[in-house]
Image (spheres, helix red, strand yellow):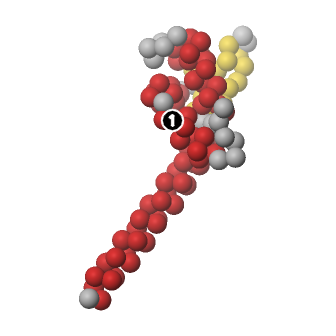
Amino acid sequence: MLDTQDPCGAVLIALADPTRRRIFEVLVHKPRSVAAVAQTVPVSRPAVSQHLRQLSDAGLVTVTKEGTRNIYAARREGVEVLRRYLDGLWSDVLTAFAEHVELKEQK
């Protein structure tokens, strides 16, 4: 079960698995059914359904009903959580580097 208190952690956990990452990458290009997704990865349909559920729980995909099929699509907002986290880290790195350069120049 994913930790809903930490959205970024949930996204990182979901994308840590190579199969889920591949499934997400497939869905970035266009929405697909479970069957269509299953054709792109070397796992069974039930396994694909489990991976899609975890991606959905992490907020990375949405699901809509079309008749008897579930259609999954990548969710941009899910990635934004991760992007903000990484941007924050990068900002800290740049600040630390600037402070280091400033100290070197003072010597």
Kind of residue at badge 1? Leu
- Which residue is disc 1 drawn over? 15
Q: Is residue 43 above or below residue 19?
A: above
Foreground pick, 50 / 23: 50
Q: Quadrant of the C terminus?
A: bottom left
**Quarter where residue 58 is shown:** top right
Residue depicted at x 55% and y 55%: 84
Q: Is residue 90 above or below residue 103?
A: above
Q: Is residue 100 above or below residue 61?
A: below
**Quarter where residue 11 is shown:** top right
Residue depicted at x 54% and y 48%: 82
| Tag 1 secondary structure | helix
The answer to whether any part of residue 76 appears in the image is no
Q: Which class describes the residues within 10 Å of circle 1: few (<14), some (14-19), or many (20+)? A: some
Residue depicted at x 43% and y 72%: 95
The answer to whether any part of residue 69 appears in the image is yes
Q: Quadrant of the N terminus?
A: top right
